[in-house]
Amino acid sequence: MIDVSELFSCTRCGFCCHGETTVSLDREDQLRMLAALDMNEDDVREQYWRISEKTVQMKTVDGHCIFYRDGCAVHSGRPHRCAQWPLHPSILDDENNFNIISESCPGIKKEIGYERFCKILSRSLSENALLPKLFRIVKK
């Protein structure tokens, strides 16, 4: 099995948490977040989620995700898209994607070089070894 730390080690800097929009939450994301927050769904919906028709997203406050407080306040229950970042398959398509992402994310192990990074990431994705490590639920 591939060790994700060969590619990335989250510094919890929060750069990926900044912006005026956040990722959409599927039902699994919602359940994981509810468990991590140890709150009932109605309260979480009112306090933390922005809901429009069938789309559920985390609210933003002052230009960042509502859970960003010098790091992710709901890290163990974060959405799968947040857990996937920055090991996004688009890196494999274009070295510019790797350069842009690695400039904005201090956790990327850019010192291993683009070719080695892609080789490990590609192997990880094809073996599906990366998914369990990124999406596992960390218990309190």
Image: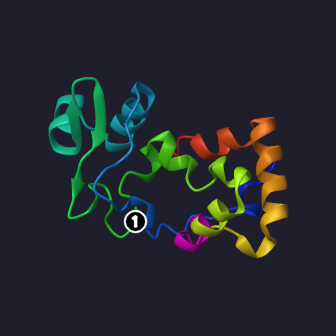
Q: Which residue is mark 1?
A: 71
Q: Nearer the viewer, residue 99 or 37?
A: 99
Quadrant (top left, top right, bottom left, bottom right) of the N terminus? top right
Image x and y of residue 105, in percent: 55, 69
Q: Position of residue 33 (x, y in %)?
A: 37, 39
Q: Is residue 36 magenta?
A: no
User: What kind of element bears circle 1?
Assistant: loop
Q: Residue, x 80% and y 37% (percent of image)?
A: 126
Q: Quadrant of residue 47?
A: top left
In the displayed structure, does residue 43 sit left or right of residue 89?
left
Q: Nearer the viewer, residue 39 or 83?
A: 83
Rendered position, 88 above or below 42: below
Query: What range of the chain is rendered magenta?
Result: 101-107
Amino acid type assigned to the residue bearing label 1 in the image: Gly
**Residue 1 seen in this snapshot:** no
| Residue 20 visible in this rendered orientation of the protein | yes
